[in-house]
Structure formats: C-alpha cells, structure tokens
Image (cartoon, rainbow, N blue to C red):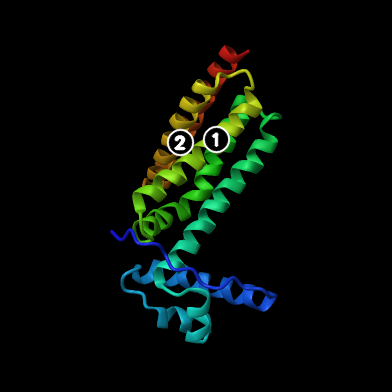
Amino acid sequence: MSTKPIAKGQEPKRAKGHLRVAAILEAGVELFTEKGFDATTMTEIAARSGTAIASLYRFFPTKESVAEALLMNYVEHALTSLDELASQASTLTPAGLAEAFIDFSLALQSQRQFAINLVDVAGASESRRQQFRKAMQEGIEAVLREVMPALAPAKSKAVAATLLNVFKGVGRISEETPATQRVLLAETKDMVRLYLSALVGTAE
C-alpha cells in the first residue's frame, strides 16, 4: 500500500477542459471496472477517452490521480445525497425516513465496491477510509438532527454509526435472488422504522 502524496494535475479552466476531464474519468471508470486498476494503463485511458496522452498527463499526472478524482466524485455524490435528504427529513415520518435511508443506501451500492477498491489503490487507504466514514456519519447525524433535534449529541453519533453499519449490510442483500432481496429489504426497512420510531419517542 502506497502512502506517498498523490500528484495533482492542472485544473481545467474552460468548458472544453471540463468536458475532457469528464471523458477521462468516464474512461477510467470503464477500464478500472473491466480490467482492474493494476492492469489498466494511462495509454488505454487516453485512447478510450479520445484524449492525447500529453493532455491526459497534464490533467492527471499518474493513474493514482485518476483513481483519487473518481473517489472524490463518489464521496461528493454521497454527501450531496445526504444533504438533500436532510433538507427533506423534517417532513418525513419514521417510516418515510427509513424508506429514504434504505433507498439512499441502495442508490450508492452500485458504486460502493468500486469506491472501496479505489480507496485501496489511491494511497493511505486506512486514512481515506476513516475520513470517508467520518463524513458519512456526520451526514447521517445531520439528517437525524432535522427529525429529532432533542436527541443528545452522543446518542445522535451512536445512532448514526449504527445506521451506517446497517447500510453496509444492505449491500450484501444485492447478492441474493430477487425474491429474497424483496423480503430482506422489507425486513430491513421495518427494522430501521421501528428503531427510528423508538428514538423519536425518547427524544420528545
């Protein structure tokens, strides 16, 4: 596992540059998924994205810097989704919030394993894992504060950590048959609903 700082490339300044970077990142997702990080080359990323190799290196000096950018995109997407959920949370019942939390987890699941793999190759993986977990937990706490403002900070932190672990388990449900998935998702939503309903009662 590498712990050296990841080289940074130039930030795009024009619309054309932003489109080029988007094309490079899309190619990175495709190739890392198809071949794995180690087997993918910068030459392949350049060819798949239709980018001159010199332009690729200007924006992304190393393959690790491509992985870093993709990981940051995943983190930003996850936290933006939690922000949106927090803005709606005060209008939701415990059942509605449970549904929204599980839907949030399912929406991220298709990208989650890919992001975990990127953490392992993008340097300082344990540090990055802890940073991401902390950001996710704080996002869940923000949602809880909207629904249960009277919940003590220590309790809110513990509940957020508990829910985060439940959401990890949701990912494993996708490995089951469709019929089993439906049953397990329904049970998980009921479990989260009952948990949040009990918390609402104690926080009032």
Element assignment for label 1: helix
The percent coordinates of residue 178 (x first, y second) are 43, 46
Between the C-alphas of marks 2 and 1, the distance is 8 Å
Instruction: Name, please, the residue furthest toward the left.
Output: 1
Circle 2/circle 1 CB separation < 8 Å:
yes
Quarter of the image where one finds residue 23: bottom right
Badge 2 local density, few (<14 within 10 Å), some, or many (20+)?
some
The percent coordinates of residue 190 (x first, y second) are 50, 27
Quarter of the image where one finds residue 99: top right
Query: Relative to residue 4, is residue 140 depicted above or below?
Result: above
Residue 37 in view: yes
**Residue at 44% from the left image edge and 29% from the top image edge:** 162
**Residue at 54% from the left image edge and 23% from the top image edge:** 153
Q: Quickly name the residue at label 1.
A: 140
Q: Quickly name the residue at label 2.
A: 164
The percent coordinates of residue 188 (x first, y second) are 46, 32
Whichever of labels 2 and 1 marks the residue nearer the N terminus, that label is 1
Which quadrant of the figure contains the N terminus?
A: bottom left
Q: Amino acid at mark 2?
A: Leu
> In the image, is 44 to the left or to the right of 90?
left
**Residue at 61% from the left image edge and 33% from the top image edge:** 143
Q: Amino acid at mark 1?
A: Ile
Instruction: Name, please, the residue furthest toward the right.
Output: 91
Query: Relative to residue 121, is residue 158 depicted above or below?
Result: above
Badge 1 local density, few (<14 within 10 Å), some, or many (20+)?
many
Query: Relative to residue 171, is residue 43 depicted above or below?
Result: below
Which quadrant of the figure contains the C terminus?
A: top right
